[in-house]
Image (cartoon, rainbow, N blue to C red):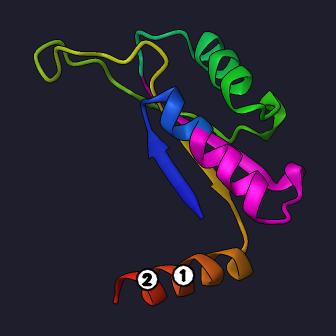
Amino acid sequence: VALTNTSPEILKYFSVWLRKYFIIDENKLRCRLYIWSNLDEIKAKNFWSKQLKVPINQFTKSYISKTIPKVRKIRHLYGVCRLSYGSKKIFNEIDEGIRKHFY
């Protein structure tokens, strides 16, 4: 189960939702950052760690993209964060809920 976004509000909502509606092991939460090479990786990890209440030691290796000046004008200061939780059981519960309500 994972969500990737640049918005702290959206990812916070997802993390609160996950913690509220499912029994999770906090140690199994993972974050991965996708950032440009000219951004401060440590600063970005600290930001997302504080926002999502996930310890930095639960961050996996960041994907650092080479900065290409003309590719993107708007750069996200803290990159893109992927919050994930590895659970087939929870995935199946979410999938079943979606199928029940939308199909």
Residue 32 on the magenta segment? yes
Label 1, secondary structure: give it: helix
Which residue corresponds to mark 2?
101
Q: Is residue 65 above or below residue 22?
A: above
Q: Residue at x 83, y 34 (%)?
A: 57
Which corner quadrant of the image does residue 51 belong to?
Answer: top right
Which residue corresponds to mark 1?
97
Picture coordinates of residue 96 (x, y %)? 55, 87
Q: Which mark is residue 15?
A: none
Q: Are marks 1 and 2 in contact (CB under 8 Å)?
A: yes
Q: Residue at x 78, y 35 (%)?
A: 54
The segment highlighted magenta reads 13-35
Q: Residue at x 76, y 50 (%)?
A: 29
Q: Residue furthest left?
A: 70
Label 2, secondary structure: give it: helix
Which corner quadrant of the image does residue 7 belong to?
Answer: top left
Amino acid under disc 2: His
Q: Nearer the viewer, residue 15 or 74?
A: 15
Q: Residue at x 66, y 14 (%)?
A: 42
